[in-house]
Amino acid sequence: QVQLVESGGGLVQAGGSLRLSCVASGSTFSIRTRGWYRQTPGKQRELVATITSVGSAVYADSVRGRFAISRDSAKDTVYLQMNNLKPEDTAVYYCNVVLAGSRIFWGQGTQVTVSS
């Protein structure tokens, strides 16, 4: 089992920045990939960015060049630095980990609202 706690969401004006954090606890030794997803009402949850245990990152086209995912293994924390935020980035952002054996765990979500 892995528990995930996100923080850092909030309200920001367009063009502003936020940094999301996600701290993992439990069986963190078996985490292979950490990621961020987002969801708006009536839409499917979508990938924002993921990072593997060796630091290989993948980004959605809509955020590439504006967002950066990073991890601090010593703190079992993954970050999402979000710059130049746009109103269409408004969503609930969820932290996600994939363990060896493909088990998946999700955080509770943190709201990000970007005003125009």
Image (cartoon, rainbow, N blue to C red):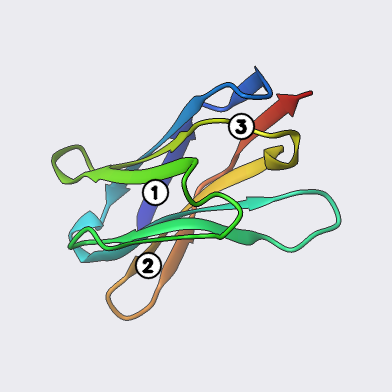
Per the image, label 2 sits on a secondary structure element best described as strand
Give the residue drawn at x 27%, y 51%. Answer: 26
Per the image, label 3 sits on a secondary structure element best described as loop
The residue that mark 1 highlights is: 3
The residue that mark 3 highlights is: 85
Q: In the picture provided, is 47 more to the left or to the right than 44?
A: left
Using the image, tell me which numbered label, if any, was put on residue 98: 2
The alpha-carbon separation of the residues under discs 2 and 1 comes to 12 Å
The alpha-carbon separation of the residues under discs 3 and 2 comes to 27 Å
Q: Are marks 3 and 2 in contact (CB under 8 Å)?
A: no
What crowding class fits label 2: few (fewer than 14 Cα within 10 Å), some (14-19), or many (20 or more)? some
Q: Is residue 35 above or below residue 30?
A: above
Q: Nearer the viewer, mark 3 or mark 2?
A: 3
Q: Is residue 54 above or below residue 77?
A: below
Q: Nearer the viewer, mark 2 or mark 1?
A: 2
What crowding class fits label 3: few (fewer than 14 Cα within 10 Å), some (14-19), or many (20 or more)? many
Amino acid type of the residue that numbered disc 1 sits on in the rendered structure: Gln
Q: In the picture provided, is 33 more to the left or to the right than 20?
A: left
Per the image, label 1 sits on a secondary structure element best described as strand
Q: Position of residue 4 (x, y in %)?
A: 41, 45
